[in-house]
Image: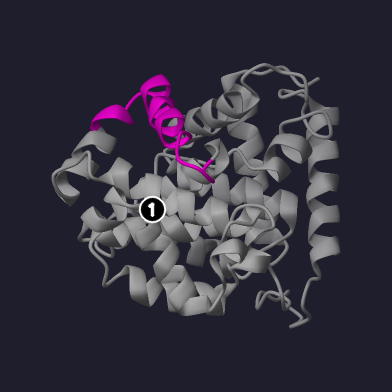
Amino acid sequence: MVPLNDKNLKELIEGAYQLLLGIGGREALNCEIDYYKRENLRSAFPTLLQVHVRMCDSIRNSGKMRLVINDNIFDAIKKRLINANLGNIARDKDVVKQLVANVTGLSSRELDKRSWKVFIDGAFCGAKWLLKFVNIDGLYGHLDAKSSQTVSAWSIVIDLDDIRGIGPAIACDFLKEIGMDNFGKPDVHVMDNVLGEKGVGWLPKNMKNREFRCFSIMRRMSELTQWSTAQVDKILWMGSSGRWDKTLDDKESNCYLGSGRVLPIPVRKRKFKDFLSEFIAEH
């Protein structure tokens, strides 16, 4: 196992960054970094209702749920949600259920099946959670105050974990998507293939509080490089997954080598794996 210390943390994330640049990922990485700038994302969510819609999007993107609630279906639901009353949603789960039924034409029985039930419950619980805050300034004030330190930042994740359909990884991803750029997602690719036993060995599968440890490592990498935790997250995820776009690569990424040839996902993953092997051997 590679010793876990600040020197190796810094060298790993900086090396991963240089590797991505070297295999044609500069354009995609810069696009991701610009996207996750705090000021850009926060300006897109001026109300709690808009944050709620984004939360619902995060919920339906978990696991295989997005295969049931695909982009076209969610876009139609989103149009209804954005014109709904957050208070009404928080008071009665059936408000969400009826909204979804109107969009999809599904029966009450069909909406009680797993994916739809999780989504509806999550939308209801999420609305109640958001209404703890008076307005959008109250929400961001709370998040900013608690996220300055790693342990208190993780307490926000635990708080969100009570919402149906939101686990720690989805909670971190949601926070990142609303402009909390000091959060990184403890993604399975990162935990297993980079920081776990297939990588540097810092996060074995049986480790207690593994997701929190991953979160802590990304936060420390951020402190050591002065990059946002969101940027650290994207570097590790892009490297380990081989995915360079925001569409889960239905099509190949639009990032090219100097020759103009698309670098396929398996090749990107292999090059990152080779980089990790060299890093491990040298440390």
Where are the magenta residues, as a range? 145-166
Q: Is residue 197 above or below residue 132?
A: above
Viewer-proximal residue among 258 and 243: 243
Using the rendered view, name the quadrant where residue 20 is placed: bottom right
Q: Nearer the viewer, residue 85 or 181?
A: 85
Residue 5 falls inside the magenta stretch: no
- Using the rendered view, name the quadrant where residue 211 is placed: top right
Depth check: give the residue in front, 217 or 169. 169
Kind of residue at disc 1: Lys
Q: Is residue 150 magenta?
A: yes
Looking at the rendered image, the quarter that the N terminus falls into is: top right
Where is residue 263 drawn, in percent x and y?
A: 78, 71
Residue 42 visible in the snapshot: no
- Placement of the C terminus among the 4 image quadrants: top right
Identify the residue shown where x is 76% and y is 81%.
259
Q: Is residue 96 above or below residue 196?
A: below
In-image side of 137 versus 1 (left or right): left
> Residue at (23%, 63%) from the top-left corner?
85
Rendered location of residue 167, percent (x, y)? 55, 38
**Is the image coloured rainbow, by chain, by secondary structure, or in one colour?**
one colour
Number of numbered discs on residues: 1
- Left or right: 273, with 209 as reference point: right
x and y percent of residue 132 in the render?
22, 38
Binning the other alpha carbons within 10 Å of mark 1 as few (below 14), some (14 to 19) or many (20 upward) gives: some
Camera-side residue of 123 and 92:
92
Q: Residue at x 70, y 70 (%)?
A: 249
Q: Secondary structure at mark 1?
A: helix
On the question of residue 59 being in view, the answer is yes
Residue carrying label 1: 93
In the figure, is residue 242 to the left or right of 96? right
Relative vertical location of residue 106 with respect to residue 86 in this rendering, above or below: below
Question: What residue is at 77 percent from the left and 77 percent from the top?
Answer: 262
